[in-house]
Image (cartoon, helix red, strand yellow):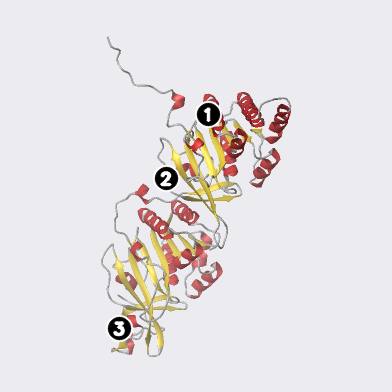
Amino acid sequence: MKPKATRATRAPDDSPDDRVPTGVEGLDEIVGGGLPSKCFYLIQGDPGSGKTTLALQFLFKGLENGEPAFYVTLSETKRELTKVAVSHGWSLDGIALLDLSAIEPRLQAEAQNTVFRPSEVELDEVTSLILQQLEGVRPSRVVFDSLSEFRLIADTPLRYRRQLLTLKQEFARHGCTVLLLDDKMESNRIGTDPHVLSLTHGVIDMEQLSPEYGSSRRRLRIMKLRGVKFREGYHDYGIVTGGVRVFPRPLADDHKYEYVPEPVSSGVPALDHMLGGGIDRGTTTLLMGPAGTGKSTLALHYIVQRALAGEKSMVFIFDETRSLLLSRSKALGMDLQSHVAAGTILLQQVDPAELSPGEFAVRVRRGVEAGCRNVVIDSLNGYLNAMPGDSYLINQLHELCSFLNQQRVMTILVLAQQGMGATLDAPINISYLADSVINLRYFESAGEVKQAISVVKKRSGAHEKSIREFALEPGRGIRVGKPLREFNAIFTGTPAFTGLASDILTPGDAAEKP
């Protein structure tokens, strides 16, 4: 009788779900919880991109979990590696280290007593020494630094590949999870050594970019990871004291929700009436207009109102200093300082030369995860100018706004337009990202420069189509007048007035009604 077919089984310790946390903040999130254990991984990158730092974090995480660690370095001495560790506040104690100082004496002795080519002797000796240490240490995590040196020692591509296969088999036999470090090969179209690409389970590509102004920007991507769903594309990262920090791109699709209207009141009845009850939670509102029309003040007014209601908010300022903003808001009668001191409003002044889009998005996300329900970015002009070398900044902003909407956050973006009167130019067309658009502009009346406000778009409901006068007064803050029905051609900047003087806002008027 023909034997009955049975499904192949896998030993429990070889489960594909076994993951090894990398110890690198943000990287485990990108790869879905960690790297599959007992596999070969290539970490390639430009000089200075942080390969060694990332590898050390990987080993230290293993030590925390009680896993023996082994570091093989053909390019650095123990002293040089110690300097890297000390700069981050780490100690190499507990990591078995095989460095140049242990390898070179054996290579010199063998080279004087053999008729074989020096490269053959060196390669065999290096491999033999690594395998001896492997038997003694029996590590769970291994870092091999670097393949560039190993490739030079091998001399020929065939011998290089054969030795890599030997090492892979031995590491696999000991159940090791291995990181192979290598410099990026620019001569190759994909930048990866083809001899290694087919042997590895995954490839992480690290880049260092140098903008014309400001500090270096770094980004990484997962080029390959067999059998694992990971977050594709580039992710910004930084090297700080304490190691590499990766900033995963926010994905709105991970946070689906069903929209439910929830208007947020401004505390100004006339403004709420214009917006059909208020700005809806879970939407993005764009405040646009020329400089000085009150865009930032209007955004802060909303944030202060939410703070009085007990909600936490974040305000990111790119254009003015923190102290000036606090002073200006106090003069207008908004007690921003006390809410900042209480932690209800998180006010962050962004350094325009030191921030990457990925790091900014992670700051926003962490604030939302900590309970912030309102976010202000003031302004998009400063945001764009802070990161001039990033080609896909608008796409990244789109992802961020989508993420915030899915989290039911009230998001307010400020955009400054250039020009006066009828001709106003925006540096970018960002209105398609916004669910609501509030337009502020100047107009001239009786020899005075006045401001007007109008709601030109609201996806989530009806809104008033009229134009109203808008004013900022010391001690009284924001004031919104009646619809300017006695004016024609307000958007030209020089409208014709056919009404009464009492229809125009004057200092000391009573509170406005819808």
> In this rendering, does residue 188 appear at all?
yes
| Few, some or many residues within 10 Å of mark 2 (<14, 14–19, 20+) | some
As drawn, the label of residue 231 is 2
- Where disc 2 sits, the SS reads loop
Q: Residue 343, how many percent across, how many down? A: 51, 59
What is the CA distance from the residue labelled 1 to the residue labelled 3?
A: 78 Å
| Few, some or many residues within 10 Å of mark 1 (<14, 14–19, 20+) | some
Q: Residue 492, how many percent across, how many down? A: 34, 82
Q: What residue sits 43% from the left and 22% below the top? A: 11
- Of all residues shown, which one is farthest toward the left? 462
Left or right, residue 495 beside residue 31:
left
Q: Are marks 3 and 2 in contact (CB under 8 Å)?
A: no
Tag in front: 1 or 2: 1
Residue type, label 3: Ala
Indicate whether 57 appears above or below 6: below
What is the CA distance from the residue labelled 1 to the residue labelled 2?
A: 29 Å
Q: Residue 448, how many percent across, how many down? A: 41, 87
Which residue is denoted by mark 1 in the rendering? 165
| Few, some or many residues within 10 Å of mark 3 (<14, 14–19, 20+) | few
Which residue is denoted by mark 3 in the rendering? 489
Left or right, residue 163 beside residue 468:
right
Q: Residue 367, how many percent across, how many down? A: 47, 54
Residue closer to the observer: 491 or 271: 491
Tag in front: 3 or 2: 2
Indicate whether 22 appears above or below 308: above
Q: Which sits earlier in the primary sequence, circle 1 or circle 3?
A: 1
Left or right, residue 133 beside residue 492:
right
Quadrant for the N terminus, please. top left
Q: Which sits earlier in the primary sequence, circle 3 or circle 2?
A: 2
Indicate whether 438 appears above or below 14: below
What is the CA distance from the residue labelled 3 to the residue labelled 2?
A: 51 Å
Indicate whether 443 appears above or below 154: below
